[in-house]
Amino acid sequence: MPAIRNKIPKRFKWPAAMGALTLFQLISFAQVVLAPGGFDPTLALIFIGYIILEWLYCLTARLAAPQSSQEVEVIAFLLSGIGLAVCGSIDTSYALKQLIAIIAGAAAYLLLSALLKNLSAAVFLRIPAAVAALGVLAFNLVAARTVNGALNWLKIGSFSVQPSEFVKVAFIFVGAVTIDKLQSTKSLAKYAVFSIACVGLLFLMRDFGTALIFFFTFVLIAFMRSGDMRSIILICTGALLGAMLVVYFKPYVAERFSTYRHIWENMDTGGFQQTRVLIYSASGGLLGLGIGEGKLRQVYAASTDLVFGMICEEWGLLLGLLVAASYAVLAVYCIKASRTAASSYYSIACVAAAGMLLFQTALNIFGITDLLPLTGVTLPFISRGGSSVIGSWALIAFIKSAGFRFKAAAQPERADIPISKNARAGRDAV
Amino acid sequence: MKNIAKRAGVLYALAAAFIVGLVILTAQFAVNGGAWSSNRFNRHIYTRGQIASAGAITDRNGEVLAKSDGGKRLYHESRAVRKATLHAVGDTEGFISTGIQSAYRQELTGYSFLNGIYTLKKYGRGSDIRLTLDANACAAAYNALDGRKGTVGVYNYKTGELLCMVSAPSYDVNNKPSAMALASQEKYEGVYLNRFLSGLYTPGSTFKVVTAAAALENIGDITTRSFVCDGKLELPSGTIICSAVHGKLNFEKAFNRSCNSAFAQIAVELGSQRLTQETVSLGFGESFSVGALATAKSRFNVSGADEAQLGWAGVGQHTTLVNPCHMLMIAGAVANGGEGLAPYLVDTITNPSGIVTYKGSLFKEKGVSMPAETASRLSGLMRSNVENYYSDSRFPGLRMCGKTGTAEVEKGKQPHAWFLGFSQRDDLPLAIVVVVENGGSGNSEAIPVAARVMKALDGGR
């Protein structure tokens, strides 16, 4: 059994994967660039630049670490590329902003990776990160401007940023622990207090979607750390009671979700976005109407929250499902990766990041199609918007951290026991 | 650490739940995709709430009743045809829910799960729908109603094809009256209602067909009975008024002259139970399917009625309400040896690639039936009505059978004029129903309408 579990997965054939990705992107980008309305050289340059960037990254990564593999980045590039094409099919300036966001996201990912490699530094920075996260959220609550009933936007100069997207990263950064703290109830309790503060602040901002993502991630991390199902059930029951209390005392919360499963009776009010997503996604069929041929793009938030509907209408439900499945593939990849991680910190962070991404994807896709209540969260990597893209990319650092391998000399101080079978050598304490 | 590795498996559960969600979502698209994509807010199809792009609708002879061209919906060139087929074709905004453009909008857009509405978007073509209607007969019927409210329906009782379906009032889609006028003016009352499918009227003497059927089935010597009519039938609980003093007459003569005294007496003798049983077996209380459309349910209720009320019910008054399409099916049953087929309106649906995806004749909906013996005897009685009473000269060469009705409605208003009948000619197996609201006597007002429509369908002879 363990032999199979710890077997190193089949070598990732990166040139084939990159080739297929590039081919797909060339076809979809060409559709956007050659759409009626005139050839835009800037747009073409943006797309070409993006493809070059992908290859540069992959080649550099291979050169720097010949043993590394880039499955995760290829998925991120695929999803980001689709988002970039959607932006480009609307407006060149959107595509440019999106490309800058992707580059910033990739940079954030590399920086965070570098930090995570130095585990002792990362562990040391957990408390400052927690304080900063709470500070940012609190500042946000005070200084924010209301967008769509949620107070989760900050205006800095000419940029609008959504701080909660960055706090997501800190949330995992703070939540993961090394082996010495793994069994500590006190440590977990401290994290619970931090989580309640985050979720509470998000609630006050009326950003219920993100609050839910944070809560889910907390439960996931708590489970990874303690493995105690009873505590998890207790937490969830407590949260449910808390939610009921909130609904009782603040009826506007329930009102936000009153159109759930009643969207067709509220086509011009609370069900507007969901009904349009269904109408136009259905219009696209399995194969889609063609990029730029859709009508959902004229609906508010089409390229942000509703982007999955735009993909279904214009690219087809089939591609929409493939996109959705990518997030599930990422999660399943993380199960394997986390098992061979060099530290429990990496294991927990990897699973938490994958779970967070998949949960957010579910909230987004099922929310806009009325299978779940609409909470207004973005689709990771794809939705237009800098904060969301950068946050998504930064989360990859946690996933990749499960693949970090340290030479004996380079092992971090206070390193816990590596769990890779080769390195374990019977020292496993747990 | 081993435990952590195990715990990571929780992501399997999450991924599985996510995949289940995607499967449910896909299944919903497969099931509801057509309905969703043909929603009135789909701007691929509708422009400012008006259907702009969809397949063509033609009559049985290929006359184009509606089609799309350059994002515009175009209708038949003749104003009379446009008005006569308004309720069958439907309006541009979809207010007439029983119109083809509303009820079959999913088909008209050419939607498929694989391609969505790609063909409509790309080539401006959806599936085309060919109706069983004859546009000229519809126009003839509309003209024959001559501005009066009412409905005319004609169908082939051997095949179920609906050849004429007209509801008045109507309006010209190319020159739609203001919403204000449609909502407030008396002449447009119920204009969005297809009276043939959705209307409910007091049947008057056309109901005597039902009472006669019950009598033929339940009273052994009914045909040899004789009745005396002195212009009314006095019962302890009230009096049934007859249209004339008919004197002594047998069952056939009573049916010919539509004698209320005789039929009220028959109804009382049958009793509420047997009469109700007859109506149930003839489809009262049921909604019938005309393709994707449904008829209103005819109502017959004599529970708790006294003798006089039962007598009135037996002559088609009291609280009885019938749907014209349902009555047409009863006429069809009489004409067709007891098997009253359900009519159908959609002949074929042809998808954008020219493949016929639907054939109305292949879908047999539930109809109305009666014993062959009853049908044959009723047929003889209805033939006798025309031969001996209404006169064959009013239906030249048609071998018509029929029953008129003059349904009393509210005080101070003219009665509804009815005609229910069929031609016995093998080459013209058509049954017809005519209702002229507040038209007066069935004999003088409904028969001429029926005659004109039948003539139009008999090659215009």
Image: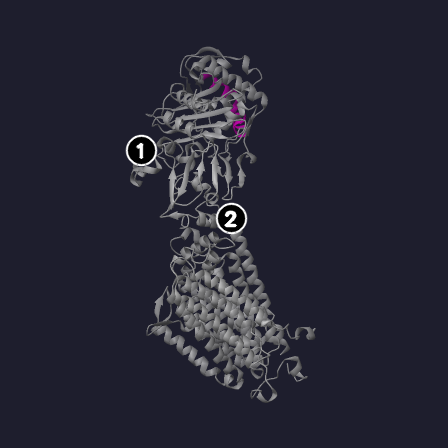
Where B39 sits versus A146, above or below?
above
- Given residues B269 and A289, the one toward you in this image is A289
Picture disc at residue B112: 2
Question: Mark 2 belongs to which subunit?
Answer: B
User: Does residue B265 belong to the magenta stretch?
Assistant: yes
Q: What's the residue type where badge 1 is placed? A: Glu
Picture disc at residue B186: 1
Task: Give the residues in magenta.
Answer: B261-280
Q: How many marks?
A: 2
SS at mark 2? loop
SS at mark 1? helix
Would residue B5 be found to the left or right of residue A85 on screen? right
- On the question of residue B16 being in view, the answer is yes
Quadrant including the C terminus of chain B: top left
- Given residues B429 and A139, the one toward you in this image is B429
- Quarter of the image where one finds residue A401: bottom right
- Given residues B277 and A331, the one toward you in this image is A331
The numbered mark, 1 or 2, whose residue comes first in the sequence reads 2
Residue B361 image offset from top left, x and y in percent: 54, 34
Would residue A225 be found to the left or right of residue B118 on screen? right
**Which secondary structure type mostly characterizes the magenta part of the structure?**
helix
Question: Mark 1 belongs to which subunit?
Answer: B
Would residue B280 be found to the left or right of residue B438 on screen? right
Residue A208 image offset from top left, x and y in percent: 43, 66
Answer whether labels 1 and 2 touch (C-beta < 8 Å).
Answer: no
- Residue name at image x 42 percent, y 27 percent: B137
Where B376 sits versus B171, above or below?
above
